[in-house]
Image (cartoon, helix red, strand yellow):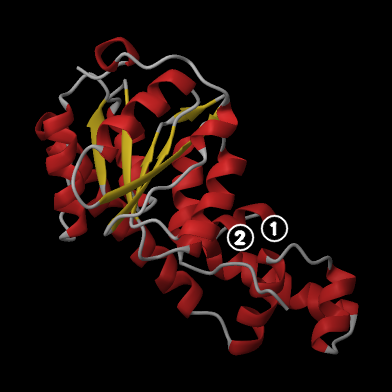
Amino acid sequence: MLDASTIGLEDRLEERLDVTGLGEVRILVVDDHRTFAEALASRLRAEPGFGVAATTTIDGARRLIDERRPDVVLLDVDLDGRDGIRFAAEIRASHADVRIVMVTAGEEEKRVAEAVRGGVNAWVAKDGSVEHLLQVVRGVLRDETHIPPRLLTYVLSDLMAAEQERNEHETLVGALTPREREVLQCMVSGMTRASIAQHLFLSPNTVRTHMQNVLGKLGVHSTLAAVAVARRAGIGEDPR
């Protein structure tokens, strides 16, 4: 079990955590428990070929990811009241090559499944051994996925259900005309009816008709529900 007492580190200022050594594999530790973050980083630095940075905040992690381009991010689920799983999805969207390992105290089925759907490569318990964590890190670098065995069946079932739901929503969206899909894309981007009309060079009444058609074909009764279907079908915001 890894904690600060086993390594003998003193609690230090957060700024001291944002230091990366040179190494073949770049690792970033993100945990709001300062002592744990530094203890884990120190232990990993002892491994040949590892360059390790650590931070206690999401803002610090964003900066270090942009600056250091880590190969692996070791991420806690709860970061000072902020959602680590949501942040993992953010990392995956902006840095597709980064491997993400959740290192956390809990193993709630739904949270693990949510993390995997968001692009997390592995889920590791904090009370496990450092040797096990190192095996997982080396595994994700080989594009392996690690899920606790007792949760594997649930996670696989969840992924299959999510894929089926996505296919169903893609079928609904696929039934839209090209113009209706353009309108839906604008709705996903948060545009008002007047903004959509201006953007697509249509009259407000025509936009209203298209929006009504979109809701009908998607089988929903509100713009918010239509946007939810679109997102599940893989339609993101248009940067315009």
Left or right of 13? Residue 7 is: left
The answer to whether residue 26 is above or below residue 53 is below
> Could you say which disc has been placed on residue 226 in the image?
2
Q: Which sits in the foreground, 105 or 231?
A: 105
Left or right of 12? Residue 37 is: left
Q: Which amino acid does label 1 sit on?
A: Thr
The answer to whether residue 132 is above or below residue 90 is above
Secondary structure beneath dot 1 equals helix
x and y percentages locating residue 221 in the rendered image: 65, 54
Which residue occupies 35% across, 34% down? 41
> Could you say which disc has been placed on residue 45 in the image?
none
Secondary structure beneath dot 2 equals helix
Which residue occupies 15% across, 55% down? 144
The answer to whether residue 59 is above or below residue 128 is below
Q: Which amino acid does label 2 sit on?
A: Ala
x and y percentages locating residue 81 in the rendered image: 57, 24
Q: Which sits in the foreground, 220 or 131?
A: 131
Q: Do the residues labelled 1 and 2 touch (CB within 8 Å)?
A: yes
x and y percentages locating residue 67 in the rendered image: 54, 59
Residue position marked by numbered label 1 in the rendering: 223
Question: Toward which corner of the image does residue 31 lie, by quadrant?
Answer: top left
